[in-house]
Amino acid sequence: MKKFALSTTALLALASPLAHAQSSITLYGIIDAGVTYFSNLNGHSAFVANDGSIQSNRWGLRGMEDIGGGSRVIFDLENGFNLYSGSMVQSGVLFSRQAWLGIANDRFGRLTLGKQYDFFWDDLTQFAMGSVAGQYSWHPGDFDHLAGTLHINNAVKYTSANYAGFQAGALYAFPSQSVSAGTGRVIAFGMHYSNGPLDLGAAYTDTHDLGLNGPSQAGTTFFPNLPATPVLANDVSSVGVGGDYHFGISTTRLLFTDTHFRIANDNGSMPTYEVNEILQVTPATTVMGGYWYSKLEAQKWQNATLLLDYALSKRTDVYTSATYLRASGGAAPVFLGGGAAPVFANGIYVGTGQSSTAVRVGIRTLF
């Protein structure tokens, strides 16, 4: 990450005699690239040159101005991009990941306004194997938002200060003027506790009028009477709890989420149970293995992942991973971001094969 503090401070000092000395702007980002082999990509095996697998490619500007009394003005502007094409992840949106401005205080916490993440991202993502192994290990469709695919427009978010390891927060988002511009009303809560080797987290998010593409996101039409096309969910609510425990070179992580869908006259819940283990074999070598199980009515998904990561430096690492995904009960084996939508008949997958394996080799650098 690159910091540009001197010029900002000088400009503030010239502009106002009341300006405080401590200000900074940080340029940061992640670049990930590699090749993935899919054993079953819509019925065929394939090698794919793709980017943003272990972490989505991004760059951003993060700023802070000390205004005295333990308070700071803060902001973050972050864009997602495709490395191989150079295009933005979301056409026409400069800062597709987050764009917010707020005030933070050492005693009272922080209040931010703009495009933001919910508390699944803040308080639970750290317990998911997808946070280490990337997109092929996230829960079906990322409907529980752990991968950070829910970017909430028009959000007002409060996060408390840290009190003896405990932190909590709440978010409210006003409805977008059009569904294509975001979502309807969003309410979210979260909390986190950290004490020595133990970390715990919990989150809840309720979203109205959320656009979902079940076939391409997770290999499902949600309910048998729905078409194999994008749908507008009247309401999607998710609740989750998780934790980890550090002991020596190992970190054991447990996670549970449950997402409830209300689409027209249909209702259903998707619980997901996950366990994973991280071993810091050497300062440079990380090994992770994990498993999760998810279901929605008769549809079931199982995912097992292994990852080996080696740090070439503090900023750059190389990695390889293997992920096995099995779907049954009418669902298709579709990885998040893994290809075009499969073929369905009356909500039942009629393509070839109930499982797929993704083997990835890549390199990542931070700045």
Image (cartoon, rainbow, N blue to C red):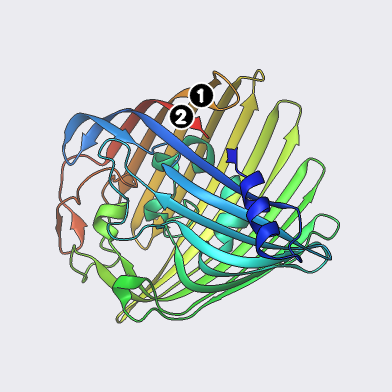
**Residue at image x 58%, y 66%?**
101
Label 1 SS: strand
Res 302 → quadrant:
top left
**Along the line of sight, the residue nearer the viewer: 302 or 217:** 217
Residue 355: image x %, image y %?
Answer: 29, 38
**Number of callouts:** 2
Q: Locate residue 338 relative to residue 341 in the image: left or right.
A: right
Residue 5 visible from this viewpoint: no
Q: CA distance from mark 2 to mark 1?
A: 5 Å
Residue 100 percent across, percent down from the top left:
54, 64
- Tag 2 residue: 364
Q: Is residue 252 visible?
A: yes
> Which residue shows up at 39% across the image and 40% down it?
136
Three-letter amino acid code at the position of disc 2: Arg
- The three-letter code of the residue at mark 1 reads Asp
N-terminal of the pair, mark 2 or mark 1, is 1
Q: Quadrant of the image for the N terminus?
A: top right
| Residue beneath the point at 23% across and 65% down | 230
Q: Is residue 50 above or below residue 203?
A: above
| Residue that label 1 marks | 317
User: Crowding at label 1, few (<14), some or many (≥20) Cα neighbours within 10 Å?
Assistant: some
Q: Secondary structure at mark 2?
A: strand
Displayed quadrant of residue 159: bottom right
Q: Residue at horizontal 15%, vertical 64%?
A: 346
Residue 169 lies left or right of residue 147; in this view the side is right
Q: Are marks 2 and 1 in contact (CB under 8 Å)?
A: yes
